[in-house]
Image (cartoon, rainbow, N blue to C red):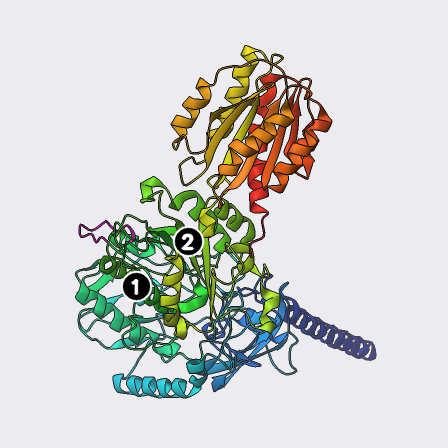
């Protein structure tokens, strides 16, 4: 009995031991499964410095390959970088996302920028912490967290010693100066615009104090907020949600290695900026804490839809460039009012000018400031005035908007002051959209367009556009707009693969002979082209795009007045002639209209120089009386060549529109060929019994595009738009060289 009990007890012990071992195995398997499957996910904009864990595995979502998630460095990345975009740059994952292993390492000096796997990383002189990224496989002996710990901007505040901060700032500026020698020559590692959007200053960085106060620096390098010296008080601010998403888009980025203000100290510069703005009283007020702040409404009008991740300006700062501008302005500045002072201006340069200003994030604040200086110098050199040139500005990014129109400022001084106050829009470089906007909206009577002055658009673009310009440019040219391009730092050979529309300048400008385009190798040499540009836009004799299909022709109508037409149908023909004529710009210097009526004989109804207004021409057409008789179309063509087109102006296109309802009694081929040889572009319109072979013989080649036939007079109206369209298509197909 005892032996049985002992055996039973021993067996139960073995069973319990086995069960315990199996349970342990299951727990280990569960932990391993948990470690491999329960991986925390991070957003595309999460920076390594925001995560406290020294080593972790995380999962990146799809779609992180976007320039608004900035990366600094190559192989080893500054902790100010987007973790997921750094992983794409290093080739660990692609834009579909995936698991990555991140290891924090010490700070580094001289982070190198490069272009890899579709991501442009930027250079950085130094940063306090770095990280490495590799495949998302756990290392032996390392336990990885299932939840990441993020730094809290409020809980880990550390006071900065002003003296040490100043010393660090000086050291940083010295290192940056040594690292920026290539910027002086604009060569070396200058990073072109590859495709970028830029950040927007957060409200935290827009707080200002009336007197210098100690700073409270949080673990987030991009936010440094002033701490009042008095007792703490609640400060009302308007904040932007960190999770707010911006519209993704391709753009180009710049190397920020030349920045003489380290990102960690950008708040110091921002504080100085706010003090300057406070002294100038730029739309700020003071609450009960004594801290001056921007009004939220005015502050965030421009910020809507902009990238929310930028809290610093990384472009170089130099005294005198006013780079403390936050990029926002008050409502009054966004809608400038015309000033009373006017100037007569330069009478030898009477043009209506619109400058398309590049406001994309890719150029940064420093280059945007250089662009404003350039425009101010152009305004001064032009000599703005009521009898001279008038100038307005449209700024473009994702979408264009008018900063001010032609009649807002009537002298160079006021215009220059207004230009200096323009804030940067940000976004892409959508030049095509801007050209469409100008064509449809800018040159109107309400905006100060003078009619008699040539319309000129000067497009300033950093590198290359992010949309197509050819179609928008063609429509603008057809509207009589002279398009000039000033391209700064054009694409290098290695970058041309990134251009959406190759040879975009030649596809946009009025002529491809070099007169309408200026290429500037560097933003720092932009000032050198002020005088050459002014000279070109003021050379009105060479502004050939002012000549359009609607304002540069002598149009002669040759009208069949034979007996077969009849009185009623003749009035229908005259209405057809009037409907065509009224679509053209008629004056003694624009399109001119003449008319011949024929039967067996011919009669000059009125010549090209008889009427110089549209109303007079339409009245003259209405007064033409029906003649009646036979049909000698060949003789009528010869008569029109002698009485109308021989007296046409040399710079006018000679267009003949012949309307007939039957076969001619004489030959039409020889007179038509003679007219063609003399430069007459002939269109034939046949009605009812007109002979198709004669219509094609009369028409200029290709005759299918220059001859029309309709079965009844009442259907003539259907060809009005088609005929005008063909005239304009032919005009615009002329070589642009």
**Which residue is rendered at x = 27% and y = 59% of the image?**
383
Which residue position is annotated with label 2?
541
Q: Secondary structure at mark 1?
A: helix
In front: 440, or 49?
A: 440
Disc sitting over residue 381 in the figure = 1
Q: Is residue 237 left or right of residue 594?
A: left
Q: Which residues are magenta?
A: 334-344
Please, is residue 473 above or below residue 183 in the view? above
Q: Secondary structure at mark 2?
A: helix
In this rendering, the answer to whether 727 lies above or below 459 is above
Q: Is 545 within the magenta?
A: no
Residue at (48%, 47%) from the top-left corner?
A: 476
| Left or right: where 392 falls relative to 709 | left
Q: Which numbered dot is residue 479? A: none
Locate the N terminus by quadrant: bottom right
Task: Look at the picture and state if 655 lies above or below 290.
Answer: above
Q: Is any atom of residue 224 visible in this view?
A: yes
Q: Nearer the viewer, mark 1 or mark 2?
A: 2
Q: How far across and how far down the image is residue 687, in percent?
A: 64, 20
Q: What's the distance in space between the residues labelled 1 and 2, CA to CA?
A: 20 Å
């Amino acid at each position: 009995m005892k032996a049985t009990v002992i055996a039973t007890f021993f067996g139960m012990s073995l069973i319990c031991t086995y069960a315990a071992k199996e349970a342990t195995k299951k727990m280990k398997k569960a932990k391993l499964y948990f470690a491999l499957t329960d991986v925390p996910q991070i957003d595309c904009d999460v920076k390594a410095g925001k995560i406290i864990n020294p080593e972790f595995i995380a999962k990146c979502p799809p779609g992180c390959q976007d320039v608004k998630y900035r990366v600094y460095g190559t192989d080893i990345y500054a902790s100010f970088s987007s973790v997921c975009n750094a992983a794409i740059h290093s080739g660990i994952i692609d834009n579909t996302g995936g698991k990555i292993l991140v290891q924090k390492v010490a700070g580094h000096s001289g982070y190198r920028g490069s272009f890899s796997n579709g991501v442009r990383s930027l250079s950085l002189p130094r940063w306090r912490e770095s990280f490495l990224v590799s495949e998302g496989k756990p290392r032996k002996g390392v336990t990885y967290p299932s939840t990441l710990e993020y730094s809290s901007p409020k809980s880990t505040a550390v006071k900065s010693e002003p003296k040490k901060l100043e010393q660090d700032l000086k050291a940083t500026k010295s290192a940056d100066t040594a690292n920026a020698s290539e910027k002086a020559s604009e060569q070396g590692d200058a990073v072109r615009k590859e495709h970028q959007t830029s950040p927007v200053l957060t409200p935290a960085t827009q707080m200002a104090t009336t007197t210098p106060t100690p700073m409270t620096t949080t673990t987030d390098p991009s936010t440094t907020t002033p701490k009042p010296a008095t007792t703490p008080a609640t400060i009302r601010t308007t904040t932007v949600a960190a999770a707010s998403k911006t519209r993704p888009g391709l753009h180009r980025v710049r190397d920020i290695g030349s920045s003489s203000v380290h990102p960690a100290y950008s708040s110091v510069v921002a504080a100085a900026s706010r003090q300057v703005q406070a002294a100038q009283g730029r739309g700020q007020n003071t609450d009960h804490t004594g801290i001056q702040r921007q009004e939220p409404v005015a502050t965030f009008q421009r910020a809507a839809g902009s990238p929310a991740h930028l809290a610093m300006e990384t472009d170089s700062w130099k005294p005198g460039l006013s780079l403390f501008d936050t990029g926002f302005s008050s409502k009054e500045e966004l809608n400038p009012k015309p000033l009373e002072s006017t100037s007569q201006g330069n009478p030898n340069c009477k043009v209506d000018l619109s400058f398309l200003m590049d406001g994309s994030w890719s150029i940064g604040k420093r280059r945007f400031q250089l662009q404003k200086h350039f425009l101010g110098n152009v305004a001064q050199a032009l000599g703005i005035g009521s009898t001279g040139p008038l100038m307005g500005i449209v700024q473009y990014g994702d979408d264009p908007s008018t900063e001010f129109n032609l009649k807002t400022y009537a002298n160079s001084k006021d215009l220059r002051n207004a230009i200096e106050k323009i804030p940067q829009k940000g976004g892409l470089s959508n030049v095509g959209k801007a050209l469409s906007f100008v064509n449809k909206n800018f040159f109107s009577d309400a905006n100060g367009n003078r009619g008699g002055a040539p319309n000129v658009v000067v497009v300033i673009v950093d590198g290359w556009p992010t949309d197509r310009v050819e179609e928008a440019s063609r429509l603008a040219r057809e509207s009589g707009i002279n398009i000039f391009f000033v391209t700064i730092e054009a694409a290098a050979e290695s970058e041309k693969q990134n251009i959406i529309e190759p040879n975009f300048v030649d596809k946009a400008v009025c002529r491809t002979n070099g007169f309408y385009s200026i290429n500037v190798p560097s933003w720092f040499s932009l000032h050198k082209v002020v005088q050459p540009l002014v000279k070109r836009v003021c050379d009105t004799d060479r502004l050939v795009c002012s000549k359009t299909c609607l304002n540069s022709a002598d149009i002669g109508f040759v009208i069949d007045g034979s007996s077969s037409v009849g009185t009623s149908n003749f009035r229908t023909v005259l209405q057809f002639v009037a409907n065509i004529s009224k679509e053209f710009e008629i004056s003694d210097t624009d399109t001119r209209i003449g008319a011949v009526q024929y039967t067996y004989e011919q009669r000059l109804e009125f010549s090209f120089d008889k009427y110089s207004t549209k109303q007079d021409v339409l009245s003259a057409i209405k007064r033409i009386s029906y003649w009646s008789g036979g049909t000698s179309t060949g003789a009528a063509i010869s008569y029109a060549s002698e009485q109308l087109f021989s007296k046409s102006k040399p710079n006018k296109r000679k267009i003949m529109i012949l309307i007939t309802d039957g076969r001619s009694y004489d030959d039409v081929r020889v007179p038509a060929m003679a007219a063609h040889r003399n430069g007459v572009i002939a269109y034939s319109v046949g009605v009812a019994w007109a002979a198709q072979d004669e219509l094609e013989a009369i028409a200029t080649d290709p005759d299918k595009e220059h001859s029309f036939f309709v079965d009844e007079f009442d259907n003539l109206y259907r060809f009005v738009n088609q005929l005008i369209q063909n005239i304009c298509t032919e005009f615009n197909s002329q070589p642009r060289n």
